[in-house]
Image: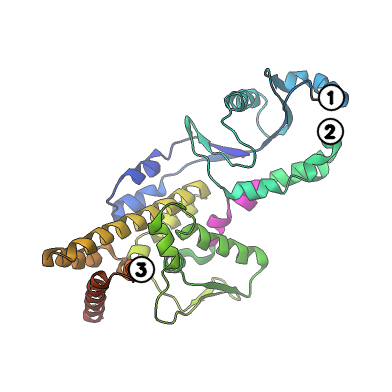
Amino acid sequence: MFTSQTSSFQESIDVEERDDFDSEDISGYSQKIQLNCYYTIYLYQGTRSEASGENVAWNQRRADSTTSQEDFSLTLIDSSLPSEAEPELRTYISRRLSKGALLGGMGNIATVELSLPEELELDKYVQGLHSSLQAPELQNLETEVRPYLSRWYEESVMHIYRVVQLVQSNISFLLHAALSHTHVEVVNSDERTKGDVSRFIKAASLQGLSQQDTTAASLCKAISEEPQCDLVIDCSASPPTLLNTVSNRFCDDWNQAFLNAAERCNPFLLRQILENFKLKAIQDMNSLKRLVRQAEMSHYALFRCCQFLQGCGNGDVLLQNARVEHSDMPEACSIIAVLEEFLREQSQAQA
């Protein structure tokens, strides 16, 4: 199951290599990309010698749809691809299989020559096919398998788009809730909307981004010492009402990028923007950690910390994380306390 696109979003990907993001960069992600969505399902057999007589006869009837290698065969079961394009996909997958590049139970994304295996939303969706694929010769193809596959794009890709469409310019409140580990409650809505919002918050948070990344892990555990109120999305009216909203300049600056991509109905660009949003948050956390360590020995570094927090627009979240991460370091805690007081004074002055 995959999509093809008629223009590149390399500009959005290239931004991952940069440390500086400004409003013009973020709004630039709104480029228009036309997407065509397809699905294809193949029957994989480990060896011809292991195949049953019944399956061999079936494969012979579909010889024109089968690609065979020494130790496996790949047979087309169903596809929404144009007939001239499907053999190219089958050849590509067969080549990857022969090299051992595709593993069972693991999702795989391939864009041109770039392949990034990771745990995807699509993996969970495909697992629902397991029982349906046990039927002999897929006799339930028309009644179960094909309808299920036809819904994959709507179920596994469009949830970010639906959430942005739901809350519109209020998306910054959800982004802040995700970064600050604030619980989000959806009331007076159907189960799909609740599920969409839950999955959006999980995707926007840094939880699970990298199990080896202590910065990401610490942010997941960074809960404010002060009592937090749940962000409530009341869907009893349209547009929905959001209660107990909190945001900051960092999250607000990403609003337009999400709205522009949603306007063009481009969920893949929305996901890329979401990943860039998280990447920038991690970069800023690393910068603050470095400055705090320097500030333990230099008053000038402390001044640079204040400048950085004032400029990044995400000081509340960064200091929340830093307070938890440095809880066993008295000198660092003292510096963080000074920085928190600085932010409070700045906020009062602006008010």
Please, what secondary structure does the residue beneath circle 1 have? helix
Q: Earlier in the sequence, mark 1 or mark 3?
A: 1
Residue 252 picture quarter: bottom left
The residue segment tinted magenta is 151-165
Which mark identifies residue 137? 2
Give neighbour class at mark 2: few <14, some 14-19, many 20+ (Cα, 10 Å).
some
Q: Characterize the local packing of mark 1: few (<14), some (14-19) or many (20 or more) Cα atoms within 10 angstroms.
A: few
In the image, what residue occupies the spot 78% across and 40% down? 133
Q: Earlier in the sequence, mark 2 or mark 1?
A: 1
| SS at badge 3 | helix
Residue at 58% in and 25% down: 92
What is the C-alpha distance between the residues marked 2 and 1? 8 Å
Between the residue at mark 2 and the residue at mark 3, the CA separation in whole angstroms equals 54 Å
Disc 3 residue type (three-letter) = Val
Q: Do the CB atoms of the residues marked 2 and 1 lie less than 8 Å apart?
A: yes
Which residue is the site of mark 3?
317
What secondary structure is marked by label 2? Answer: helix
- Across and down, in percent, residue 11 comes to 37, 41
Q: Which residue is mark 1?
A: 58
Residue at screen point 18% across, 66% down: 296
Q: Is residue 207 left or right of residue 11?
A: right
Q: Nearer the viewer, residue 202 or 296?
A: 296
Q: Tell me where residue 74 sits by quadrant.
A: top right
Q: Is residue 168 left or right of residue 137?
A: left
Between 57 and 258, the one lying in front of the other is 57
Tell me the chief SS of the magenta region: helix
